[in-house]
Image (cartoon, rainbow, N blue to C red):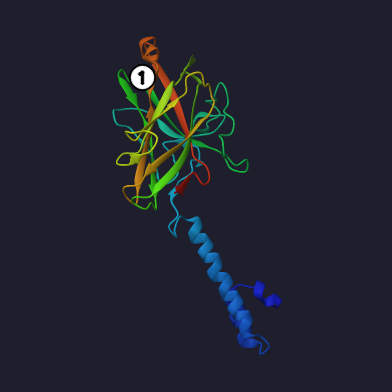
């Protein structure tokens, strides 16, 4: 092999037209490198049959999420978006009282941001409203079994001079699937006593289609005393998804 292999394939071909000493092997190697790099990029994009779930480390901001993530507002005004370990929506004016640490599996070189949603009563509106996080799982094979790993947490900050509340739990639902560890397709994350601490679970399910949506929302009824003891509240929930969070399993 010669030094010309390290040039872009276009320059290699042009050089070979000008240099009679350029061998056919040089052209073939350069073309192979181009094809191989393109193949690797496609695999990284979720093609070639690999299941995908978008990470959560998007640009922080209210109502801002990475592609494939959606903030749902099924019953009125409720906020949602992307936060950082230190600030709600990444805004220094809204620091968490207790900053979060990296979620399990987080890469220290990444932003490690996460999607935030909430449940509220008599704070943003006079009635109960909540926001919910949704993400699409893509490139699934119907009938195949998959493991998807999520990390959830709750944290608080001072809002208009008053502290918010830690959420007691969350529900994660994958409608239309056959769940192996939650018969109804619903998995409960118990966050009672977990103040700004991540709880991680791996959910096993059988895909029914090539794409499935996950829905994640506050589950305040996990602690009945929470609702009965609060005349008003606002509770923030976070979901973190990192690298290789979904895999096909036997």
Element at label 1: helix
Q: Crowdedness of circle 1 by 10 Å Cα count: few (<14), some, many (20+)?
A: few
**In the current view of this chain or complex, which residue is farthest to the front?**
250
Instruction: Return the x and y of residue 190 as percentages of the image width and height.
Output: 45, 24
Residue under the image location 55 percent in, 65 percent down: 37
Which of 144/17 is in front? 144
Residue at the spot of label 1: 221
Q: Position of residue 250 (x, y in %)?
A: 44, 49
- Figure quadrant of the N terminus: bottom right
Q: Residue at x 52, y 60 (%)?
A: 41
Q: Position of residue 56 (x, y in %)?
A: 48, 40
Snapshot quadrant of residue 34: bottom right
Query: Is residue 241 shown left or right of residue 69?
Result: right
Is residue 14 positioned above or below 217 on the image? Answer: below
Q: Is residue 224 above or below residue 105?
A: above
Nearest the viewer among 6 and 245 is 245
Instruction: Pinpoint residue 17: horizontal percent, then vertical percent.
Output: 60, 87
């Amino acid at each position: 092999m010669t030094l010309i292999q390290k040039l872009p394939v276009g320059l290699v071909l042009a050089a070979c037209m000008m240099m009679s000493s350029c061998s056919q092997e040089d052209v073939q190697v350069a073309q192979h490198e181009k094809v191989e790099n393109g193949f690797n990029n496609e695999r990284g994009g979720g093609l070639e049959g690999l299941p995908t779930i978008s990470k959560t480390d998007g640009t922080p901001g209210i109502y801002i999420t990475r592609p494939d993530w959606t903030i749902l507002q099924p019953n009125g005004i409720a906020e949602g978006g992307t936060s950082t370990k230190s600030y709600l929506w990444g805004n220094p004016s809204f620091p968490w009282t207790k900053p979060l640490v990296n979620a399990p599996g987080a890469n220290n070189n990444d932003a490690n941001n996460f999607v935030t949603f909430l449940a509220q009563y008599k704070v943003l509106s006079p009635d109960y409203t909540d926001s919910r996080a949704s993400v699409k799982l893509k490139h699934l094979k119907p009938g195949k079994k998959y493991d998807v790993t999520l990390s959830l947490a709750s944290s608080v900050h001072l809002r208009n001079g008053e502290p918010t509340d830690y959420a007691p739990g969350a529900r994660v639902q994958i409608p239309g699937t056959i769940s192996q560890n939650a018969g109804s397709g619903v998995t409960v994350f118990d966050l009672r006593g977990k103040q700004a601490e991540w709880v991680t679970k791996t959910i096993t399910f059988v895909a029914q289609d090539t794409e499935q949506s996950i829905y994640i929302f506050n589950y305040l009824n996990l602690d009945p005393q929470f609702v009965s003891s609060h005349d008003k509240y606002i509770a923030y929930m976070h979901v973190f998804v990192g690298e290789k969070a979904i895999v096909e399993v036997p």
